[in-house]
Image (spheres, helix red, strand yellow):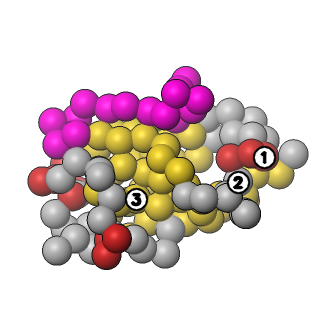
Amino acid sequence: QVQLVESGGGLVTAGESIKLSCAGSGINSRAMAWYRQAPGKQREFVARISITGVTSVANDLRGRFTIARDYAKNTVHLQINSLAPEDTAVYYCNTYPSQSNYWGQGTQVTVSS
């Protein structure tokens, strides 16, 4: 069983950066990913990282989004640079592929223009 807790969201201004964190037991032994859900839209895949640290970012987000692991802290991070208003969403972490019973509360990122 994996229990995930996302943190690090907030209200930021366009152009700034933010670093999100996902902590939980069992993270180090699973492929993990970040997803997001913008207002009025379906949840979408953002980035994933394998157990060994190989990463992949959604095609339209490459260059601004970076996913990384901290094995010592059982944590997965998502660094987002050059934030834009369209990045406003609730960001969730989950395994990859996602498991329905692992969705947490997410962390809200709001980008003002």
Q: Crowding at label 1, few (<14), some or many (≥20) Cα neighbours within 10 Å?
A: some
Is 86 on the left-hand or right-hand side of 42? right
**Where does the magenta region start and end?**
50-65
Is 65 on the left-hand or right-hand side of 25? right
Where does label 1 land, which residue? 85
Residue at 22% across, 48% down: 31
Residue at the limit of the structure toward the top, as seen here:
63
Numbered badge on residue 21? none
Residue at 42% across, 73% down: 104
Q: Residue 25 location in percent, x, y?
A: 19, 68
Rendered image quadrant of residue 43: bottom right
Q: Earlier in the sequence, mark 2 or mark 3?
A: 2
Look at label 1 and name its amino acid: Pro
Is 83 on the left-hand or right-hand side of 2? right
Question: Which of these two is toward me, 42 or 67?
Answer: 42
Residue at the limit of the structure toward the right, as seen here:
113
Looking at the picture, does residue 98 appear above or below residue 1? above
Where does label 3 land, which residue? 93
Q: The residue tagged with tag 1: helix, strand or loop?
A: helix
Q: The residue tagged with tag 2: helix, strand or loop?
A: loop
Q: Answer yes or no: do the residues labelled 2 and 1 have beta carbons within 8 Å?
A: yes
Numbered badge on residue 88? 2
Look at label 3 and name its amino acid: Cys
Measured Cα–Cα span from mark 2 to mark 3: 16 Å
Q: The residue tagged with tag 3: helix, strand or loop?
A: strand
| Residue 53 appearing in the image | yes
Q: Crowding at label 3, few (<14), some or many (≥20) Cα neighbours within 10 Å?
A: many
